[in-house]
Every structure is written in structure tokens, then in C-alpha cells.
């Protein structure tokens, strides 16, 4: 029996404590967290580089547009070409013209009044 109690005491002494479990778990998880931070940093750098390229291209396009506008302003001759206006149909005027054109004529909904032929022939 003494041997069994001694075995239990030795076994309980050899078991790791909760702090040791925590430390072992931390040592296992630490490299995973570090790798995840590196991956996120690499993705961030890649996205920022793409944004920088996009902004640079837009900046160059805008500068080219500004240069083109400045050149056009320098080369002005003092006269401007006639503006191009699209003729818009004015429905109100169109209706007035149509009404005046057909003034006094029967519309398709109105039938002309028939002349009394019966009274003319009977007299």
C-alpha cells in the first residue's frame, strides 16, 4: 500500500500545472498568430500598392487633361465656333400650328353635318 501511495504522490508531482499547460499552448499558437500577422501585412501592402498605382494613373490622366485645356486656351483665336443647338420640338407651338392649319375643318371625331337633301328635293 505504501508503494501505491508513493506512486500516486510521484504521479501527481510529475503532472504539469495549469500554468505549464497555458505556456505550452501559447508556444504552439504563437507561430500561427505571427504568420497570420505577416499575411495580413503582406495583403495590406499589396492593396496599398494597387491603390497607389491607380491614383498615379488617375493623376497623370488629369494632368494630361489640364495640359490639353491650357493648350486650347492659349491657341484661342478670339472667335469661337457657333454653338450647336439641337432643335427641340415645342409641343405647345406644334399644337397651335396644327389647330390653326385645320381651323374650320372637321376632325376625324366630328362628322360633317349632312345637308338636308330631302327638304331640297321635296320642295
Image (cartoon, grey):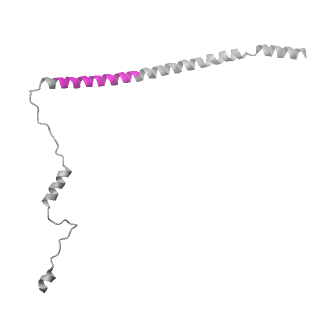
Q: Magenta: predominant secondary structure element?
A: helix
Q: Is residue 106 left or right of residue 29?
A: left
Q: Quadrant of the C terminus?
A: bottom left
Residue for point 45% across, 20% down: 42
Residue sitting farthest toward the front: 123
Residue 53 at what x, y percent from top left? 34, 23
Who is closer to the viewer here, 116 or 105? 116
Quadrant position of residue 18: top right
Residue 20 at what x, y percent from top left? 69, 15
Residue 22 is covered by the magenta coloring: no
Tell me where the magenta segment starts and ends, as one range.
Answer: 48-70
Who is closer to the viewer here, 81 or 36? 81
Who is closer to the viewer here, 110 or 40? 110
- The answer to whether 33 is drawn above or below residue 80 in the figure is above
- The answer to whether 68 is drawn above or below residue 87 in the figure is above
Residue 64 is covered by the magenta coloring: yes
Residue for point 60% across, 19% down: 29
Residue for point 31% across, 22% down: 56
Residue 79 at what x, y percent from top left? 9, 30
Quadrant position of residue 57: top left
Residue for point 50% across, 19% down: 38
Q: Is residue 122 left or right of residue 36?
A: left
- The answer to whether 113 is drawn above or below residue 4 in the figure is below
Residue sitting farthest toward the bottom: 122
Amino acid at each position: 500500500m505504501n508503494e501505491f501511495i508513493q506512486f500516486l504522490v510521484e504521479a501527481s508531482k510529475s503532472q504539469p500545472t495549469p500554468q505549464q499547460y497555458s505556456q505550452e499552448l501559447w508556444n504552439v499558437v504563437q507561430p500561427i498568430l505571427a504568420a497570420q500577422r505577416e499575411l495580413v501585412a503582406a495583403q495590406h501592402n499589396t492593396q496599398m500598392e494597387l491603390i497607389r498605382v491607380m491614383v498615379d494613373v488617375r493623376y497623370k490622366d488629369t494632368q494630361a487633361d489640364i495640359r490639353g485645356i491650357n493648350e486650347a486656351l492659349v491657341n484661342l483665336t478670339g472667335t469661337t465656333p457657333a454653338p450647336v443647338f439641337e432643335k427641340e420640338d415645342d409641343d405647345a407651338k406644334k399644337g397651335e400650328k396644327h389647330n390653326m392649319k385645320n381651323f374650320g375643318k372637321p376632325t376625324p371625331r366630328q362628322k360633317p353635318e349632312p345637308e338636308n337633301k330631302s327638304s331640297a328635293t321635296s320642295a
